[in-house]
Amino acid sequence: MMNVKVLYFASLREAVGRSAEEFGLPGDIATVGELRAHLAARGEGWQALAAGRNVRAAVNQRMVGADAQVAAGDEIAFFPPVTGG
């Protein structure tokens, strides 16, 4: 199992009730899109990450698309498209 760190920002952090978590990915998750689907399947607030929602992602602080690969030790961040600054 691959261990990764997942970060949630802005309204996503509020929806899921946490800013970060570390966990082992099931073996069938290889991409950012598959990770999003896995997280959204948790239900309720996690639906903010569901497919079709406007969510941006970064792996190791680089913007990526849903087909980006995830690897052990990666930091995956999810955030809404507009984050104030």
Image (spheres, rainbow, N blue to C red):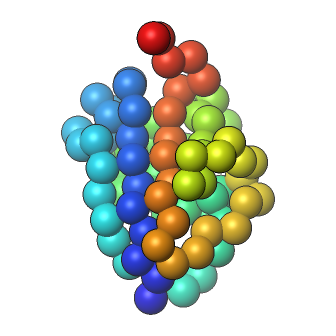
User: Residue at image x 76%, y 59%?
Assistant: 67
- Residue 46 occupies quadrant: top left
Q: Is residue 25 visible?
A: no
Q: Is residue 23 positioned above or below 59 on the image?
A: below
- What x and y, as percent, mark residue 77? 49, 46
User: Residue at image x 43%, y 69%?
Assistant: 4
User: Residue at image x 44%, y 42%?
Assistant: 47
- What x and y, as percent, mark residue 18? 24, 43
Q: Is residue 70 toward the left or the right of residue 25 in the image?
A: right
- What x and y, as percent, mark residue 35? 55, 62
- What x and y, as percent, mark residue 28? 59, 82
Q: Is residue 32 visible?
A: yes
User: Residue at image x 67%, y 37%?
Assistant: 52
Of the pair 43 and 17, the residue shown nearer to us: 17
Of the pair 60 and 67, the residue shown nearer to us: 60
Of the pair 5 and 14, the residue shown nearer to us: 5
Quarter of the image where the N terminus is located: bottom left
Quarter of the image where the C terminus is located: top left
